[in-house]
Amino acid sequence: MIKKDGRLLKPWLKQLSSYRVQLVIGITLALATALFGIGLLSLSGWFITAAALYIGFDIYTPGGGIRFFAVARTVSRYFERLLNHDLVLKLQARWRVALFRLLQKIPLHKTLSFRVSDTVQQLTRNLNAMDNLLIRLVMPALVFILASLLLLVFWSFYNTWLSLVLVSGALATGCCAWRLAVKSRKLAVKSLRHQQRLRDNAMNFADSVTELSAWDCYDSQAVNVLNKSQALEQLEVEQLQLQQRTQWITDVTAQLVALLVLILALVQFEQGQIGSAEVIMLALSALAWQELASELPMQWAGYGNTLAAARRLLKSEKAEQPGESLRSGKRKSKGRARAVTIQLNELTVWRQQRPLFENLSISFEPGVVHWVEGASGIGKSTLAEVLMGLYPDNWIQGEITTTPDVCLRTEASYLTQETEIFDASVRDNLNPKRLPLAESWYWKVLKLVHLDEKIASLAEKLDTRIGPRGIQLSGGQLRRLALARVLLQDKPVVILDEPFAGIERHLVKDILERLVAEKEDKTWIIISHVSTDEINAEIPVGQRLIL
């Protein structure tokens, strides 16, 4: 298990090597803070005891030492927090950049299934959990070990048995921390699974209240969500109980060390080997060490969450990388072309070990409308994804070429079946990249889809906010807005997947005729379950592909 955990944490620990100097300074300051605290308590105890026992006493030297330890402890703690938290923020920035660069390498067909709640938020939560790696795992362990070793050297000048007591206490504390880490590791894995299931069930439950009520399943589903919530709560209770037991064992161990140190010091005092002030100094130094020992297991209680986060992040790193492809969607663009011809040569596309279509050879030429129709699930949308380079390469055979040689991913406008509308203004929905476009361009495409009058009637026109917190448009109007966004790109190839879904039938004919007449030099590929005969639009029709 240690080797496995090491493999998971090694890539993250390796990042610390880029900040060696700051890391060493941070550890040194953290150790100095701990030692100054021990020194302050020990010297203060010695000073108070000596002042109470002796009639004539030089108070200036130990008094200056006490002030030095107090000020030095405050200063070192301040700069230690400053440097170490700065280091954590730098590491976070480095990890985020590396992770999102990695996401850019994931094939586009895989990112299409990403949801904010399931993917992006999970990635950021995992990255935030990695904060603990330095602040709560590495740093406390190193400081505890180094401080114990230095205190061991100090005590060895008085009595060898004191050193043995300290070694035994340190080992017992380390074992407690490791036992808590191992058990929390298992609980963290279970907890993360329960959290994911609860999140998915709760979101599905919230999105389907109406349907569940209609089918009389609302109560049973509510009980299901409540049961998962209680199971997660039970795991959290187990984790808390484990921490409390470990804390109790650690406190007893540390107190036993302090008691044994006091007894051994008193024995030496009775034998005349040390003075009473030194007895108090050794006892108080043991109490100061006890504070470090008590904190260590609690710091390592989050080990399981950090390890689970590291595992999930590394899983995303092993995502499939895009390979070489014969499709034009993967080739580099050689510049914007005015007219593009697309040629499919013996194209076969597979899904779940069955061919959607086989040996398809067809040419899509500019200036005409190519109509792809067929029943649902037959592969119409898949053909659009293949053309756009969004489909897995290993499920495709054949070749796609373009004349001139261009990249369809950059030279084609693509309207998917999903009507994605942002919670933003009309202008930002039409132009998400915020390209410097003339005002007339917006109104031109809005007129083509019969939305110009509606948008003009809004209070702020193009700057009117639509979406959840703005003015709501009807389903058909939102679909036309999405279509206008595609047209505004003004690319030589236009691929539209069910562009007229939800749009009134009497508008479809006029919109289609306007589009083709206005953009007659483009290569139109329209995917629809409705045939051209039903629309009866006066447009130049090219290839008619029935899947």
Image: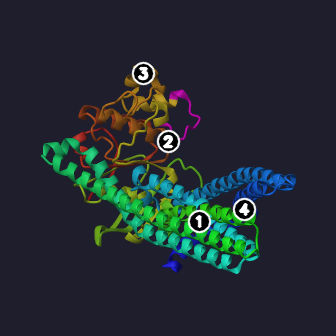
Circle 2: is it few (<14), some (14-19), or many (20+) Cα within 10 Å? some
Query: Does dot 1 land on a helix, a strand or a loop?
Result: helix
Q: Percent x, y for residue 360? A: 33, 66
Magenta span? 430-440
The residue that label 3 is drawn on is 456
- Whole-number angstrom distance, CA of label 3 to CA of label 2: 21 Å
The residue that label 4 is drawn on is 35
Q: Which residue is depicted at the point 35% across and 44% down?
A: 540
Q: Which residue is depicted at the point 82% across and 52% down?
A: 63
Camera sees residue 320? no
Find residue 160 and name its label.
none
Q: Percent x, y for residue 133? A: 58, 63
Say which amino acid is labelled 2. Gln
The residue that label 2 is drawn on is 489
Q: Nearer the viewer, mark 2 or mark 4?
A: 4
Q: Quadrant of residue 284?
A: bottom right
Tell me which label, 1 or 2, sits earlier in the chain.
1
Say which amino acid is labelled 4. Leu
- Whole-number angstrom distance, CA of label 4 to CA of label 3: 72 Å
Q: Percent x, y for residue 304? A: 47, 66
